[in-house]
Amino acid sequence: MKSSTGAHTGTGTWLVQRATAVALAVALPGLTIHFLTALPVDFAGWQTLFVPLWVRVLLLLTMTALALHAWVGMRDIFMDYIQPVGLRLALYLAVIVTLAGCEIVMLMALWK
Amino acid sequence: MKPIARPVYLNLLRIHLPLTGWVSILHRVSGVLLFAALPFSVWALSVSLSGEAGFRQMADAAAHPLAKLVVVGLVWAFAHHLFGGLRHLALDVHRGTGLRTARQSSLVVILAAGLVTLAAAWRLFA
């Protein structure tokens, strides 16, 4: 249904931020504990930690949630503090390129 | 006595933030810090998995006192952002919105993040 008071796209963005927040609040401490308990390791041991498929899938999913979460957060901050439209768009683009780059580097590091 | 003139602009040095305000602005600051650290972390992980030499390089870099200091700073940022974020999620579902509980939960966020940071500093430097 079309609303008479704006497109309400902000509600969707808000929900993405909250949903990824919950996912990250579970995944990041879990992954941190999982890796920290395995330390210290040499290179062979370090590599072995990334062999199980679930570890790699979970890391990539976490990276994706992180990218979405960071995008909404940085966008909020720029909308609040950066008034010139051109500069704001340039910063948006920089954030998107950075996060997409992180996603790609992560994917290539885990599957090669 | 003349009352203090009301600020006509936001003078950051004269603004007195309540505890809840500190937790709020530090949530943003910690979020930006974590965003800034993300590309370097992903790059470091990638290098560490690229081979024996890359792993050695990253392990040596991580052992440097300056790197440890950065890690302690990022542990604070992560802990504050996580605890402050959980507080926000509670506020979203109308839990702890009273002034008294909001102040108390702010204090809990600051203290909990401080404790985690101290533990990390202790673990890395002691």
Image (cartoon, coloured by chain):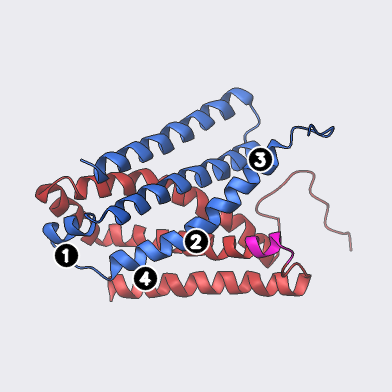
**Which mark identifies residue A2?**
none
Q: Which mark is residue B120?
A: 4
The three-letter code of the residue at mark 3 reads Asp
Do marks 2 and 3 share a subunit? yes
Q: Is residue A1 above or below residue A15?
A: above
Say if A87 sits above or below A15 in the image: above
Q: Amino acid at mark 4?
A: Ala
Mark 2 to mark 4: distance in Å?
19 Å
Say if the magenta span includes residue A17. no
Which residue is under mark 2?
A25
Q: Residues within 10 Å of mark 4 (few under 14, many from 20)?
A: some
CA gap between label 1 and label 3 equals 44 Å
- Image: magenta residue range: B88-94
Residue annotated with mark 1: A41
Q: Nearer the viewer, residue B117 or B86?
A: B86
Q: Dot 2 lies on which element?
A: helix
Give the vertical position of B117 relative to A97 (above or below): below
